[in-house]
């Protein structure tokens, strides 16, 4: 016999015991998070070997109950998690989060609204449309509703290159009846598979190649151009590449410019790229997943001059906007270009509903079921105001320049790229240390500090050189915090450089 009382108790619903359990468990959870925050250690999980031995899934027929399960999650997951707000957690575009965003998550999760039809999220649908309009005005597109919230940069970039490709094919190919070719209805023409190209810089996000592969075009459809000494797309090289492809009979559907590259934080010369794409009739998509935060900047908004000239834009709010994962957006300048992915399902977005002004968000998204992540940004903007929000964004830019000056003045450290936005690429260079061992030394300095929970700094390549990376976007990290971190880096390098040189060193990651 079905025990509906137990069913209701387990479910979040209008049941007295369910409500009581929810309030109790949520109270326990927030207390556990508070206790975790009070612990000053950045990370206590140890090495990957330590974690593997500590973590085990325990499914039983009887179950252990909500409170015991929560206790177990606190021990297995929460207490072994990285504190992204810690001043020594600077490896990635992995931001500390706004309190408003955390509160919004409670409302999002409790209501479980889905954005694929108005009747599943009545208020949320109208709120997202308003927030898209606000974002469009902030980037310089003007008022409108052409845009949608996404899971993040990869999905937004996919929408950009997808619409660009299909617009290109529609413009340059005809079907058997002489009408513009529709990829949505007829697939990709055989010769378009080889002749349609997308261009990006060699420092662009890997999602450009990934997305073109998923679209069936393959890596071969992506042409990369070199970057200048500041890690920005080389404009001369772009112009030469466009001219060469045109001479070969290829058609450039899209140039993807980057506003904030993953490693260097470089912002491509947006206006110059727009001029070149206009010459060849190509779509311009801007991957502003990171640098797009500067649309709210009080001091550095000019770094994004030209963003308003693009055809589409990627924004990510779980980077320099300090929102919880995941939260991104795709903006489209001309709403008419949404026709390339429009679809109607009677049970979601019927023509009748559209005729009566019901928001149709599912036709603007690659997703069907979709969270109301827009609430997090909405609540944060309303809570903080634009000026304070801008100040928090600007701090990272200012801090980066201070850190670069300090590294340049410190023996044993070397800057590898002049900083632009909020990223520092550097390395340890002990005096008279063998050049051929520097890559190994820098890699293992980062691994050692992470395994002991002292610091999380990134490791990447600048050209062929192993680089350490600090993503200095946190609005609460100070120059003194970073100096302390760099002292740890230097001390660790001094500790392990001898064993590495002697061949007796065992990496922390093993």
Image (cartoon, rainbow, N blue to C red):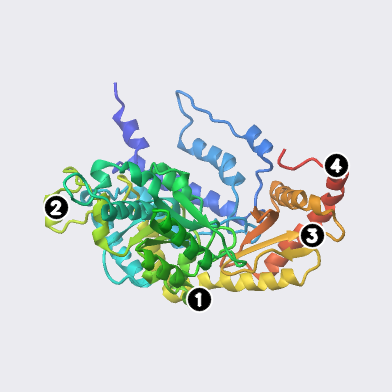
Residue 458 x, y percent position in the rendering: 64, 54
Q: Is residue 74 above or below residue 134?
A: above
Q: Earlier in the sequence, mark 2 or mark 4?
A: 2
Distance (Cα) linking label 3 and label 1: 33 Å
Residue beneath label 2, please? 353
Residue beneath label 3, please? 429
Residue 352 x, y percent position in the rendering: 11, 51
Distance (Cα) linking label 4 and label 3: 19 Å
Image quarter in which the N terminus is found: top left
* Res 503 label: 4
Distance (Cα) linking label 2 and label 3: 65 Å
Distance (Cα) linking label 1 and label 4: 48 Å
The reply, left or right, for residue 199 in relation to residue 448 is: left
* Res 176 label: none
Residue 348: quadrant of the picture: top left
CB atoms of marks 1 and 2 within 8 Å:
no
Q: Is residue 316 visible?
A: no
Image quarter in which the C terminus is found: top right
Distance (Cα) linking label 1 and label 2: 43 Å
Q: For the residue carrying disc 1, how many other residues have a C-alpha within 10 Å: few (<14), some (14-19), or many (20+)?
A: some
Q: For the residue carrying disc 4, how many other residues have a C-alpha within 10 Å: few (<14), some (14-19), or many (20+)?
A: few
Q: Is residue 34 above or below residue 64?
A: below
SS type, badge 2: helix
Residue 275: quadrant of the picture: bottom left
Distance (Cα) linking label 2 and label 4: 71 Å
């Amino acid at each position: 016999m079905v025990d509906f009382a137990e069913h209701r108790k387990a479910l979040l619903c209008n049941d007295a015991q369910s409500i009581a359990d929810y309030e109790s468990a949520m109270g326990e959870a927030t207390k556990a998070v508070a206790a975790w925050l009070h612990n000053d250690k950045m990370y206590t999980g140890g090495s990957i070997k330590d974690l593997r031995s500590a973590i085990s899934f325990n499914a039983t027929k009887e179950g252990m109950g909500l409170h015991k399960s929560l206790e177990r999650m606190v021990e297995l997951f929460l207490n072994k998690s990285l504190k992204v707000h810690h001043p020594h957690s600077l490896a990635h575009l992995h931001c500390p989060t706004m309190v408003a965003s955390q509160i919004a998550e409670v409302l999002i999760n409790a209501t479980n609204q889905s954005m694929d039809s108005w009747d599943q999220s009545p208020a949320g649908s109208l709120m997202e449309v308003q927030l898209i309009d606000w974002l469009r005005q902030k980037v310089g597109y003007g008022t409108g509703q052409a845009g949608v919230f996404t899971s993040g940069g990869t999905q937004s970039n996919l929408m950009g290159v997808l619409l660009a490709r299909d617009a290109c094919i529609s413009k340059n190919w005809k079907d058997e009846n002489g009408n513009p070719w529709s990829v949505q209805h007829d697939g990709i023409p055989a010769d378009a598979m080889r002749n349609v190209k997308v261009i990006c810089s060699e420092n662009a996000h890997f999602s450009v190649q990934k997305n073109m592969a998923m679209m069936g075009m393959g890596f071969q459809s992506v042409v990369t151009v070199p970057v200048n000494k500041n890690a920005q797309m080389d404009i001369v090289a772009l112009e030469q590449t466009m001219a060469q492809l045109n001479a070969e009979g290829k058609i450039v559907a899209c140039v993807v410019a980057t506003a904030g590259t993953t490693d260097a934080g470089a912002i491509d010369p947006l206006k110059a790229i727009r001029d070149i794409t206009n010459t060849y009739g190509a779509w311009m998509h801007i991957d502003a997943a990171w640098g797009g935060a500067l649309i709210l900047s009080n001091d550095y908004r000019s770094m994004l001059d030209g963003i308003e000239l693009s055809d589409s834009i990627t924004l990510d709010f779980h980077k320099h906007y300090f929102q919880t994962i995941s939260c991104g957006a795709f903006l489209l300048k001309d709403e008419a270009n949404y026709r390339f992915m429009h679809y109607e399902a009677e049970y979601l977005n019927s023509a009748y509903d559209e005729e009566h002004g019901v928001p149709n968000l599912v036709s603007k998204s690659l997703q069907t079921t979709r969270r109301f992540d827009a609430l997090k940004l909405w609540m944060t903007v309303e809570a903080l105001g634009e000026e304070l929000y801008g100040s928090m964004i600007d701090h990272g830019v200012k801090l980066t320049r201070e850190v670069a000056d300090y590294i340049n003045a410190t023996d044993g450290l070397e800057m590898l790229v002049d900083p632009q936005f909020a990223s520092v690429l550097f390395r340890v260079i002990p005096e008279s240390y063998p050049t051929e061992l520097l890559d190994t030394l820098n890699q293992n300095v980062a691994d050692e500090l992470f395994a002991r929970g002292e610091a999380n700094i990134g490791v990447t390549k600048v050209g062929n050189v192993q680089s350490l990376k600090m993503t200095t976007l946190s609005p609460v990290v100070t120059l003194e915090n970073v100096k302390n971190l760099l002292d740890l880096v230097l001390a660790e390098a001094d500790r392990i450089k001898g064993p590495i040189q002697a061949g007796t060193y065992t990496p922390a990651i093993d």
